[in-house]
Image (spheres, grey):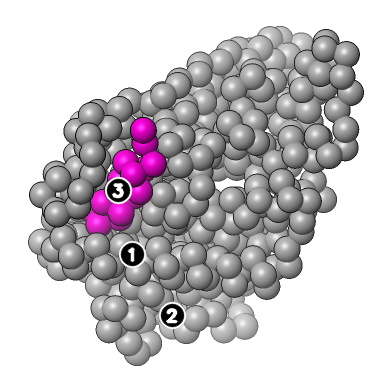
Amino acid sequence: MTAINPFESAMKQLEKAHTVLKASKKKLTNIDRKVAVLRVPQRQVNVTIPVVMDDGTQKIFEGYRVQFNNARGPYKGGIRYHHNVSLDEVKALSFWMAMKCAVADLPLGGGKGGIILDPKMLSQGELERVSRGYGNAIADFIGPDLDVPAPDVNTNGVIMGWMVDEFLKVQRKKAKAFGVTLSKKDERKLTSTFTGKAIKDGGSEGREEATGLGGLFVLQAILKRLKLKGTLTAAVQGFGNVGYNVAKFLDEAGIRVVAVSDSKGGIYVAEGINPALTLECKKKNGYLAGCYCSGSVCDLKKGKQVTNESLLELPVDILVPAALENALTRENAAKVKAKVVLEMANGPTTPEADTILYKKGIPVIPDILSNSGGVTVSAFEWEQNRKGQHWTKTQVNQKLAKKMADAAGAVWDASVTHKTDLRTAAFVVALERILTAMK
């Protein structure tokens, strides 16, 4: 199968939204000129990170930071560690972040970062040295009013903490060169440069589960409009932080999660898995196979193994791709039996698959809407840091629920108005907001 270029996919989505918006009665000035600007990132930063490994040898790691558009506010987007990170992938993800922030109506733009590495092959010390090296390398290009990074695939609050520390060292050194000492207030504001931090470092309550919870809020809003009721079933591809949390929240909301998977394969339990017990079993065994945990017990008789590919074809009500890009393609989209697809990964559905699913009458709730809960709470963290505040989890979740419901409503209304699919509608909503903000 020919490799799918994620940036080309992103640009097809942009052009489709552009066409729909031009055909509407919306009065937007210089729309073609502004969209042309949106086809290329405003800045691409390539960095090399020399790291002394535990055995004394030196290894050079390559990383990126792409700043796509800041018409609505500072660039915003995560940093991922993966052996398949590429510049085209990071460009696509930074574009999608710009769209995602606009759909959620956040005062932020879009950016993304990544390092080509397999974190499983590094010791904790090596991982820290790489992270600090990256934080140092991009320090001149980020800041609370310029670019606000966060965790993504294979990164977390600990890693953000290392990067914050390096960033502050650079800023203190710069200030010292001008004979200035940064105040505590200055440093507190500077820590808002990174979100997804640990609570002790200024992180927000509710951040870890925000993407999954936000996905539930969006799903509930769309299901209400689709008038899908009763006991619904779901299959979740991906059982990392996002996949686990969305499975947990679906289960708590009364939706029976019958299948989950990770990179090594998946499990199917007809009566529904217990997400917490399943995660506990996976951690104990090191893999999902055999973790047929339903109710309050794990029993090998309860379920069976499934592949990642076959999970996508299960006869469930809700399919949740929550792993990596391009899970649903022209090769397998026709085999999808779900009534709704909730995208929790970034870019899990190719444009060709979108067309097939739309013709089959299967609504795809797009990633730039459904997984925007994470960046929304990141924006809350950024706001709290800048104001010197700390909100309770209840406050955060209440604000998140409203943001997600409003965003889902705007996208649904746009899909009805323009007689188009939800993804195109989401891009139309985002594009209109960004074009309005552009000069």
On the image, numbered disc 1 is attached to which residue? 410
Within-10-Å neighbours for mark 1: few <14, some 14–19, many 20+ = some
Disc 1 versus disc 2: distance between alpha carbons?
A: 25 Å
In percent of the image, x 18 and y 65: which residue is there?
A: 417
Give the foreground label among 3 and 1: 3
- Residue type at mark 2 is Ile
Magenta stretch encompasses residue 426: yes
| Main secondary structure found in the magenta portion | helix
Residue 244 position, x and y percent, is: 54, 62
Mark 1 in CB contact with mark 2 (< 8 angstroms): no
Residue 345 position, x and y percent, is: 42, 51
Quarter of the C terminus within the rendering:
top left
In magenta, the rendered stretch is 424-439
- The residue closer to the viewer here, 170 or 133, is 170
Q: Tell me: residue 413, above or below residue 386.
A: below
On the image, numbered disc 3 is attached to which residue? 432
Marking on residue 255: 2
Residue 3 position, x and y percent, is: 26, 31
Quarter of the N terminus within the rendering:
top left
Q: Which of the 4 quarters of the picture holds residue 53?
A: top right
